[in-house]
Image (cartoon, rainbow, N blue to C red):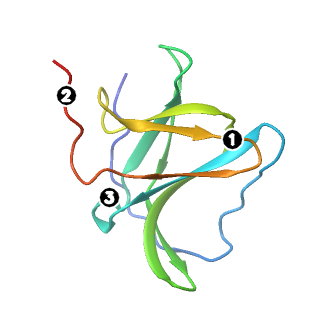
Amino acid sequence: MHSHHRHHAYGPTETGTVVLDLGGDTGALIIYTGRDLHGREIEISRVDGADAPRTHVAVRERIVQDGIFHSAVYPDLAAGLYTVWWDEDTPAGTVAVNGGAIAEFTWPTSAPPVAI
């Protein structure tokens, strides 16, 4: 598997440019990051399978009424428990996505410890 942790040059998104389709068994996930991850693709996968496919989106600058923040938005996810990947092999953590709701995850400020 090749890494999707590339950086891309994206302009900012403004209020109302991301549409979330919530309801039933469909939820969304927002991963909050620092400015230093702007353009980086962050992968997630469902926990319920060792070979669960990963999906990724890029961290974008978000301009909102209260200011500017950086995040990766996954707008259309099946409800379940997801692994957020720090890199190809290291999980950054897990997050539960519930149908009809927006789950939130804050990107760690340092690499998670490696299991020995």
Residue at screen point 34% across, 42% down: 5
Q: Are marks 1 and 2 in contact (CB under 8 Å)?
A: no
The answer for how far apart the CA atoms under marks 3 and 1 are is 26 Å
Residue at the disc numbered 3: 37
The disc at residue 19 is none
Disc 2 on helix, strand or loop? loop
Between 73 and 10, which is closer to the camera in this rendering?
73
Left or right: residue 87 versus residue 77 is left
Dot 1, how many residues are within 10 Å of its Cα: few (below 14), some (14-19), or many (20+)?
Answer: many
Looking at the image, is 48 positioned above or below residue 10? above
Residue 32: which quarter of the image?
Answer: bottom left
Comparing labels 3 and 2, the label whose residue is closer to the camera: 2
Residue 10 location (% of width, % of height): 44, 65
Looking at the image, is 88 positioned above or below residue 40? above
Looking at the image, is 47 positioned above or below residue 55? above
Left or right: residue 59 versus residue 80 is left
The disc at residue 98 is 1
The amino acid type, in three-letter code, at marker 3 is: Leu
Residue at screen point 32% across, 58% down: 37
The answer for how far apart the CA atoms under marks 3 and 2 are is 21 Å
The disc at residue 114 is 2
Comparing labels 3 and 1, the label whose residue is closer to the camera: 1
Is residue 75 in view from this perspective?
A: no
The answer for how far apart the CA atoms under marks 1 and 2 are is 29 Å
The amino acid type, in three-letter code, at marker 2 is: Val
Between 94 and 13, which is closer to the camera in this rendering?
94
Disc 1 on helix, strand or loop? loop
Left or right: residue 78 versus residue 88 is right
Residue 58 location (% of width, % of height): 45, 53
Q: Earlier in the sequence, mark 3 or mark 1?
A: 3
Residue 61: which quarter of the image?
Answer: bottom left
Residue at screen point 72% across, 56% down: 20
